[in-house]
Image (spheres, rainbow, N blue to C red):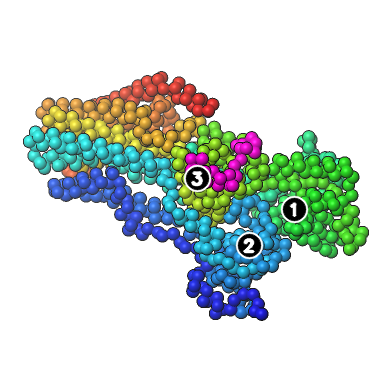
Amino acid sequence: MAGPGLSSQAAAERLEQYGPNCLPKPARLSFIRLFILQFKSAFIYVLLAAFIACLLLGQFLNAIFIFAVLMLNAIIGTVQEYSAQQAADALSKMVPSQTKVIRDGHPKLVDSLSLVPGDYILLTNGDRIGADIKIEKHNQFKVDESALTGESLAVNKTDLAFAGTLVTHGRAEGEVIATGARTQIGQIAALVRQGGSAKPPLMQRIERFTLIIAIATLIIIALIFGLTLLRGADLSQVFLLGVALAVSAIPEGLPAAITVALAIGMKRMSQANVIVRKLVAVESLGSCTYIASDKTGTLTVNEMTISQISLLSGERYHVAGTGLTPTGLVHKHGHGVPVSTARDPELYRLALTGVLANEAHLSFEAEQSHADQMHADGDGVDLAFLTLGYKLNLEMDRTKQAPQEQLFAYESENQFSASINRIEGRSVISVKGAVEKLLTMCQLNAQQTQAVLDETHWLARHGYRVLALASGEVGDPHHPLQGLEFLGLVAMSDPLREDAIDAVALCQQAQIKVAMITGDHPITALALARQLKLADDQEGVITGDQLIQAQQQSLAEFDSLIASHRVFARVQPRQKMEITESLIRQGEFVAMTGDGVNDAPALKHAHVGIAMGRKGTDVARESADLVLTDDRFSSIVKGIIEGRIVYNNIRKVIYLLISTGAAELLLFILSVLFAQPIPLFPLQILWLNLVTNGVQDVALAFEPGEGHEIDQPPRKPSEPIFDRLMLERLIVSALWMGMMAFGLFSLLLAMGNSENDARNLTLMLMVLFENVHALNSRSERNSLLRMPVLSNPLLLFGIVLAQGIHIGASYTPGLSEVLGISPIGVGQWLMLLSAASTLLFIDEYHKRLWRQQHSPKVRQATADRQLE
């Protein structure tokens, strides 16, 4: 009878049939294709029309200027999107480079890419499994599947094991049943590639905004175009006027200014331990109304930790610290003084038993930087007991030197592990395992047994995994597990990160809903949810089976169930994605956090995906928009604040550009209505919008936060960029600037000045208006007089630079002729500056009126929302 495994020839034939053991890579758009897609925008269409009109009219300088704007915007967008094209590529990294198989009847290492169905794999502790296998033989075989399922504990595997999971204990052999895209990881990869990511909030708002501006511009141009034709104006002048109107209405510098604002936010986020992989995600995080967070490795440390100890005597101890770090003192319940094992021999024996009945390895090396370098290997439960030993200052090296005479490795059927060691000339057995199992090995009376069971149930109800410990001198070598002394219980869990509770509370303060989604047991989920104040009882926890039942009833029932709960347990990877999609359907802007392969589909489909950087899997990081370098949930809160600052700055930039553009448009409309010559040429308007204003709007993007960003409610998904406040401010400022500029232009002509001189002075007035307006744009509600003058020195420099560039251009031969400008006297400049400064008083007066009329209403509305 043939042995297990394949021959080399059979393996080669199957490799030809099934293909290499790798995951398909997502289709990528070429650089050229991405470049072409940048021209799908309402703004771009209007600019393209203006560009063509300039060519037809022979206005080649204007055409070149507009063409340069189009190319610059397209190049910026293409580079951003091309660098962001990474989604499921890193899934292939979950497959190890080599795997031990039986080929031609002999064990050999082969490239994991060449694994095929039918191969016979040999697995041992520390191996990452390269394909889905059916287990044929196993010995104390345990696998860490947290990256795949979200389950925090390593699980015993006796039937199937899956690609990408890690062997933590024992050995196994089995036959490959699926490779590549047919594995469990492959099916998750298909979910990641399925459909597209949710469109970022900023892009949704910008698209609506650009469409409205473009339509309004075209309508105004058509009306004025028709009016001037009816008056019998020259056709070439009419076209030139149309181009000038289009250029004045469109904020050509907006894409570049938004990119700068996002880039600044990206840098500030990196200082808060948030790495931005997709630029628009900077603002997306600030827009989120809902954070759906994975539990394992995100809210928790993903390391088993002993938190409480209960001795048979009734004494309870609290163990501080989380994870595998050896810091954290042990206190007797109700006492603040740390305990000493020298004065508490019962605690010492329990800790020593846990260290001896152990197959893991944990050590720390002090580096020159005085930071501890950790080396850990083995099962999470065993590592937790070693960590306890360090916390209690056991002489770990000495305990490991106790010669081991016999090992009883953990078997799921036996529910315990044990070790017989030679200590001081005696054979001593140390046992740890399930409480019910160890009770049968120990000599306890009925009262003691009931006390142990009561304590076990109490700990379990609080979400702990409970193990018992016992030890004794070996009397009968043939029956060493009898007549033992029961030492006590340990309660362990995958604890919350130390900052998680405060971070979730801050999210709730910011009126952002938070939900926990996990593959763990509902009892475990509830215990953590209570600490986070996400649920009070078991009814507040929804399981994956309940979600399936709701889906079978109707989509509305499914959405209703999700909307009314904040804790989801025993959910599958697809269900995480479906929860995210349901929240989006209900109008939420969703951020999803996670660290495992099972989180990747939801990370990809959320408005913004947030992955853990330290312990997260490659696929989670590559599917996410943001990566937390410190794995702290609290860093999300810092990112939210920075995201809100970025959005506020984008609004400031948009207000500055649109209001000055509207003033230019009003200047033209008034000139047409009163039959005046064209007040500014298209090239002069482009100079205003891109050069003088372009310096200032970029500097405005550097504005720091105004404070209290965390106290603001999240913006409603339906909220446009132009809300009532911005519209009021825009109308007031645009009317004032437009009428003042038209008044100056008309007055100069009436006084006998030439059209060129009138345009020269009108252009200088508009530059000065932009300088003053940049200061007004620093805050929507706060008075400029109450803001620190030097909080944004770049803006002050930008204002001076913009004025200097324009004055310098008027003295530069060639450039002055192209722009149609010339130097002006100091007296004229001071008069124009005085006229422009009036805008400061107009804006300050409007801000004051707004605060008086709306601030109490805003505070009351915020309070009402908090009560709800």
Name the residue beneath numbered marker 1: 386
- Callout 1 touching callout 2 (CB < 8 Å): no
Residue beneath label 2, please? 160
The kind of residue tagged 2 is: Leu
Residue 650 quadrant: top left
Separation (CA) of disc 1 from disc 2:
30 Å
The residue segment tinted magenta is 534-557
Asked whether residue 356 is in view, the answer is: no
Front position among marks 3 and 1: 3
Kindly identify the amino acid type of the residue bearing the numbered disc 1.
Answer: Leu
The residue lying at 31 percent from left, 36 percent from top is: 657
Look at the image and tell me whether residue 33 can be seen.
Answer: yes
Q: Would you place residue 502 above or below residue 626 in this image?
A: above
Secondary structure under the numbered disc 3 in the rendered image: helix
N-term mark: 3 or 1: 1
Q: Is residue 446 left or right of residue 161?
A: right
| Mark nearer the N terminus (1 vs 2) | 2
Residue at x 70%, y 65% (from the top left corner): 138
- Where in the figure is residue 591, as x and y percent of width and height? 50, 43
Q: Which residue is mark 3?
A: 580
Q: Secondary structure at mark 2?
A: strand
The residue type indicated by label 3 comes to Thr
Q: Looking at this view, is 393 or 519 the one in front?
A: 519
User: Which residue is situated farthest in the front direction here?
Assistant: 553
Q: Is residue 34 magenta?
A: no
Kindly identify the residue that appears in the image at 82 percent across and 52 percent down. Answer: 438
Q: CA distance from mark 3 to mark 1?
A: 39 Å
Quadrant for residue 171, please give it: bottom right
- Give left or right: position of 509 versus 234: right
Left or right, residue 740 beside residue 433: left
Around disc 2, counting alpha carbons within 10 Å, would you say few (fewer than 14), some (14 to 19), or many (20 or more)? Answer: some
